[in-house]
Amino acid sequence: MTNQNSKAPTRRVVLVANVAAGSLVDGGLTPEALRERLESAGLEVVAEPRPDAPLPERLAAAAEAPGIDAVAVAGGDGTLACAAQALTGQDIPLGILPLGTMNLLAKDLGVPVDLDAAIAVLAQGHARAIDAGEVNGHVFLINSVLGMPARMARHREAKRGRMGLLDMVRMAAGLLRHLGRYPRDRALLTLGGETRRVRFRTLAVVCGDYREGVGQVLSRAGVDGGHFTLYLVETLSAARLVRLGLGFAIGEWRRLPELERHETDALTLDARGRAVRVMNDGEVVLIAPPLRYRLRPGSLRVLVPAENPR
């Protein structure tokens, strides 16, 4: 089938919408409305193979649908990481419909957060290979975080889509409790052939690295650089938290004394105990140690704007 308005063949996609994400959970959109907008843009939307299955199984089935050109995923960064679990290492590209809270991956790739513009990328964009990270079989595309942020995330998850002012105050109070009461995490870190004991409040493994500069908070410098960046914060008092926050705000934070930074393509963390709470692209999972991180360079194909600005 061809599009009457273009010589390019019509792109056939399976649409998988996470109804628990961002704009969908707020009631502003429905999967049916999304399908209509995709078809209006000239896309051929193939029926989802397993629409009633859990989200990971829906995405895995969609990736195996015959004769498709892409899997279009509507949701946030955690949903996209779930899709990457099925699509990494495959020829079928991921199409991004950014309907989450942060939409960090879409911004890193230059995919517009405006829905209609993102649909245009899905219809007309080009496939680009990007790096993916993996920890004990769990794929992530942006970062994998341990320590205080991962523990705090469970409070956010409980209030997803219904955070009020009181909830935000409670989360701030919980942050202060974590700073004062909870002991630092301990682990054996193997990096660059050397093993040492570390204690930390926060540890993050980033695919690529973050940009420095005003207004560049959590914006990555690249998505195909072929390396991880490890960030480790050993101690985090209220004063140090403020200093780090200011460093991020003004775009000068890599050299702060509170922050340890390394580039690598693999590392291992052995907590020698029960399962570790790990936050991959904003979604928390429990993983039994040791945690073995490895980079999978260029292993995921993603549809990006034709001009590919980044």
Image (cartoon, rainbow, N blue to C red):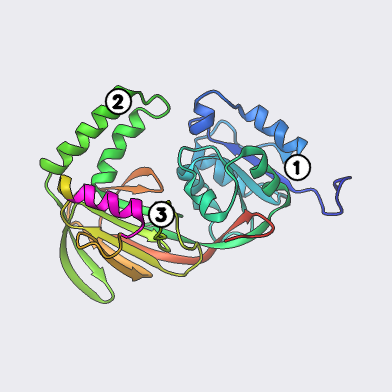
Name the residue: 28% across, 75% down. 192
Q: Quadrant of the C terminus?
A: bottom right
Q: Which residue is mark 1?
A: 43
> Which sits in the foreground, 264 or 213?
213
Secondary structure found at label 1:
loop
Q: Which residue is mark 2?
A: 167
Residue 247 magenta-drawn?
A: yes
Q: Earlier in the sequence, mark 2 or mark 1?
A: 1
Measured in 3D between alpha carbons, the distance from the residue under mark 3 to the one under mark 1, in whole angstroms, is: 38 Å
Q: Please tell me whether the stretch drawn in magenta is mainly helix, strand or loop.
A: helix
Q: Position of residue 168 (x, y in %)?
A: 30, 29
Q: Earlier in the sequence, mark 2 or mark 3?
A: 2
Please state if 295 lies on the left or on the right of 249 as rendered: right
Query: Hey, which residue is sitting farthest right in the picture?
Result: 4
Q: Is residue 156 above or below residue 148?
A: above
Residue 99 magenta-drawn?
A: no
Q: Position of residue 91 (x, y in %)?
A: 63, 60
Q: Which mark is residue 214?
A: 3
Mark nearest the camera among 3 and 1 is 3
> Which sits in the foreground, 10 or 149?
149
Please state if 11 lies on the left or on the right of 71 as rendered: right
